[in-house]
Image (cartoon, rainbow, N blue to C red):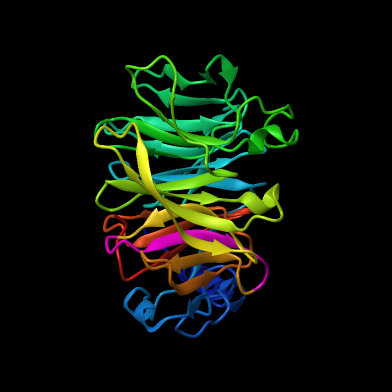
Amino acid sequence: MKLGRRQFLSSTLALAAVSSAPHVLAYSPSQAMPLRRYPDNAWKIEDERFKELYVFNTPLERHWTGGLWLEGPAWNAVGRYAVFSDIPRANQMRWDEATGQVSVLRRHVGHSNGNAFDNQGRLLACEHYPARVLRYEWDGSTTVLASHYQGKPLNAPNDLIVLSSGGIIFTDPGYGAHVDYEGRERELELKPAIYYIDDTLDEPILLTDEIYKPNGIVLTPDGKGFYASDTAPSHFPDQPAAIIRWTLGQDGKSVSDRKEIVTNQKETYDGLACDVEGNIWSSASGGEGVDGVAIFSPEGTLLGRILLPEVCANVCFVGEDRNRLLMTASQSIYTLYTATRGA
């Protein structure tokens, strides 16, 4: 199409007007993130060894907010997404690493808490009410793996791990039974405990009830044991919060060598992850200067912290290289690149 002189001048002036409008095409300072210096203030070094684990030039990223109480992140390496739970809303959520988008994966999921993917890539979830451990099958159906022990209903399964054998170990502290917010208020009929279950069993095997409030759980890097957090102070004020290690029997159906790795009266630990060196990355709460993630050596020495503006409930390593820590923190999810990899 051939433009006349008048049309050409009109078009030129219109383009000039648009290009001079900063809110349309040009960079707008109001849309920029607040300036932050490296290293990010989220990092807090407590031990010189932590300098081998943190990255100097990476920012703490807040990807989404709007939850009520976020928990249970689990990484799916094939799909490059993480599943996490908004427990009060009874929603399973999905964070897509490639796009950064967060969406609802499932609604009305029984106030599910901890999530994991089994050795076949199927999603496992701990539900508070009805109290059960559930598996989502490839055809869209569900299988209830555990709901009762010795004829009594489970308290409110919280978190779980998958063994190389396919067996599952889960914690059952009962938080979803204490108030009508994250489940259904009711009297606990069982002691808080840690259980084993697999497809060959009609009911779980009790591994240990020598723990006040078993909460987060993670395998040791060699798979021969596991750590579990004890959030005892929530209901037993005289007892310290703890991170405890057990050795697994060869078949995964028994435990021994109970050892308290970390105890603390001033802060509480919940969700856990391990890196390839065996360090423990635990969510931590206790007020400003504590809320976020505490990182411990395998022997229990505090190495460092990741400080967040919200209480952190759980963590997991995500990404192609498993070197990015995803944190579910109260109402928001955050990530931070690290100098190590998840085990």
Q: Position of residue 140 (x, y in %)?
A: 40, 19
Q: Nearer the viewer, residue 5 or 257?
A: 257
Q: Is residue 88 above or below residue 46?
A: above
Is 320 situated above or below 41?
Answer: above
**Residue 82 shows in this picture:** yes
User: Residue 242 appears at what percent x and percent y?
Assistant: 54, 56
Q: Is residue 316 visible?
A: no
- In the image, taking residue 317 as reference, residue 110 lies left or right, namely right
Task: Locate the C terminus and report the quarter of the image it occupies.
Answer: bottom left
Magenta-tinted stretch: 276-288
Rendered-image quadrant of the N terminus: bottom left
Is 73 left, or right, of 111 in this rendering?
Answer: left
Question: Residue 337's image quarter?
Answer: bottom left
User: Which residue is located at x 34 percent, y 73 percent?
Assistant: 53
User: In the displayed structure, would residue 128 be above or below residue 298?
Assistant: above
Q: Is residue 60 magenta?
A: no
Relative depth, front residue between 262 and 319: 262
**Who's the residue at 34% across and 30% down the image?**
122
User: Is residue 281 magenta-colored?
Assistant: yes
* Residue 83 in the image, given as x and y percentages of width and height: 45, 42
Residue 47 image point, x, y percent:
42, 81
Give the camera-side residue of 177 and 18: 177
Quarter of the view holding residue 164: top left
Residue shown at the point (65%, 35%) measured from the top left: 176
Residue 64 position by quadrant = bottom right
